[in-house]
Amino acid sequence: MDKKKRVLLVEDDANTQALYSEVLQGAGFEVKLASDGEEGLMNARLGGYDLILLDIMLPKLDGLGVLTGLKDQPPTTKNGPIIVLTNLSDEALNKQAEQLGAKGYLIKSDVHTSELVAKLTSFL
């Protein structure tokens, strides 16, 4: 039996967090939640996640701050790809996130939960 894929979900909106968590767990992922950027960065620095879903607009430290923190001080145990979750289809922001190490982005309003797992699996 394969080990469950570990996902770190860094999202401050409780409804989005609950929805994504439920969908991912239903698809067999092990989900770790972080509700702000500082908590997300702390968890990401522990490493060992197969995938990190990172909201851009976060309390305490925004998503770009988390990416910068990981770039400046990478985890000893590598993480899989970081996918930025955003409500903003802002090309400049998404480019900046990619320059800081994100492998892609999903615009929350464009991704139906039924497509979420397929889209994320394509990054794994």
Image: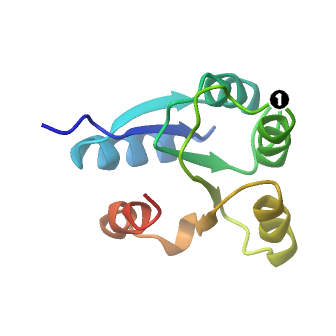
Tag 1: Cα neighbours inside 10 Å, few (<14), some, or many (≥20)?
few
**83 and 76: which one is in front?**
76
Q: Residue at x 76, y 63 (%)?
A: 98
**Residue 46, above or below 80:** above
Q: Residue at x 67, y 64 (%)?
A: 87
| Quadrant (top left/top right/bottom left/bottom right) for the N terminus | top left
Task: State left or right for residue 119 relative to residue 108.
Answer: left
Which residue sits furthest left?
Answer: 1
* Residue marked by disc 1: 60
Task: State left or right for residue 36 relative to residue 47.
Answer: right
Residue 115 location in percent, x, y?
35, 70
Residue 30 location in percent, x, y?
34, 34
The answer to which image quadrant residue 21 occupies is top left
**Residue 113, above or below 53:** below
**60 and 74: which one is in front?**
74
Q: Residue at x 31, y 41 (%)?
A: 29
Badge count: 1
Q: How is the image coloured?
A: rainbow
Task: State left or right for residue 46 relative to residue 22.
Answer: right
Residue 77 location in percent, x, y?
58, 28
Q: Secondary structure at mark 1?
A: loop
Residue 70 location in percent, x, y?
77, 37
**Residue 29, above or below 123:** above
The answer to which image quadrant residue 122 occupies is bottom left
| Quadrant (top left/top right/bottom left/bottom right) for the C terminus | bottom left
Task: State left or right for residue 104 relative to residue 68.
Answer: left
Q: Residue at x 60, y 41 (%)?
A: 11
The answer to which image quadrant residue 102 occupies is bottom right
**Which three-letter amino acid code belongs to the residue tagged 1?**
Lys
